[in-house]
Image: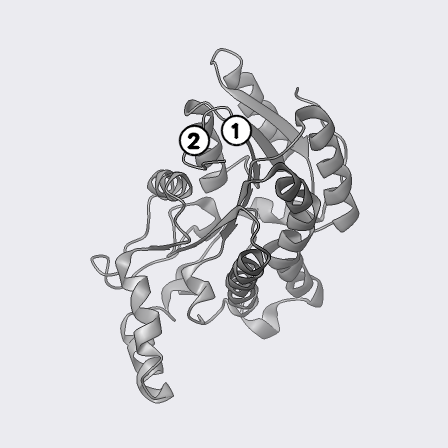
Amino acid sequence: MSMSQIDGRNVLVTGGASGIGLHMAQKLADRGAKVIIWDIDDSKMENIAARMKSKERQIAFYHCDVSNRSEVYKTAEAVKKDFGRLDILINNAGIVSGKGFLECTDEQLEKSMSVNLLAHFWTVRAFLPGMIRAGGGHIVTISSAGGLIGVSRLVDYCTSKFAAFGFDEALRMEIGQEKWNIKTTVVCPYFANTGMFEGVRTRFPRLLPILDEQRIAERIINAIAKDRRRLLMPWMVYSTWLLRYLPTFAFDFLANLLGINSAMLTFRGRTSAQNLTEKSKPVDFN
């Protein structure tokens, strides 16, 4: 299967009811994909469903807390029953505490790892076998620039995103060795103008701009269509690998100079992130 063909494909976007996930879902649907959104925010999914009634977009909604392994497997079975095979899996759901490491509760730390990392395990284990049997598929891992460089007040977030980046790399190697016809793409954007990172500031906007969420969504979809294995945004993010050749004191100095470690000092974030702990309940918008 050529993944440059998005039209008619079944695409799952986790965390697809807001932010970059929602923009991806809408743009994929505009390109003719059958889009499946997983999210925990029922009211947002209801509003999206209402808005989509008058448009020729094929979007289905499922309530799923991706940090809950059994719920992921159960919802995956429902998707398979309703749609058959899945062609493209976009692991987009994520949370950020925005707090100092010692300010986070144990539960918040565990939740960051569950949503930002472990959820990828469960979704891929649920859908990869079907892709292998069908002879094609594409797995997209939304990591972060924070998965390439550590940032103050993002210890839990960066840890999970570093791991997500490693997950994509190791999975790509295994897929290649097994000679499965499965494509992978890892995405590492800098801070975006989403509610998730509300209040974040950048010291040098020309070098490290706060990215537009619609532009990020468009670039991710283009990367999928072109089978790109890696997408980093903006170009400055690629320099993190070069900076690691420096002694740690020089590395840390440049990170501070660029304002990376002060970016979160004005962070406010999205209060609805707390909803991730709400009890799961079924929602049917089909």
Quarter location, residue 208 = bottom left
* Residue at disc 2, secondary structure: loop
The CA distance from mark 1 to mark 2 is 8 Å
Q: Which residue is mark 1?
A: 9
Q: Circle 2 sits on which residue?
A: 5
Neighbours of disc 2 within 10 Å: few (<14), some (14-19), many (20+)? some
Secondary structure type for disc 1: loop
The residue at the far front in this view is 179
The local crowd at label 1, few if under 14, some if 14 to 19, many if 20 or more residues have their Cα within 10 Å, is many
- Residue 117's disc is none
**Can you see residue 10?**
yes
Q: Hey, what amino acid is under mark 2?
A: Gln
Q: Are marks 1 and 2 in contact (CB under 8 Å)?
A: yes
Q: Amino acid at mark 1?
A: Arg
Instruction: State the residue lying farthest toward the top.
Output: 54
Q: Is residue 66 visible?
A: no
Residue drawn at (45%, 22%) of the image: 32
Front one among 140 and 236 = 140
* Spot occupied by residue 8 in the image (x, y as percentages of width and height): 50, 24
Identify whether 154 is placed above or below 273. below
The answer to whether residue 105 is left or right of residue 182 is right
In this rendering, the count of numbered labels is: 2
Q: Nearer the viewer, residue 184 or 154?
A: 184
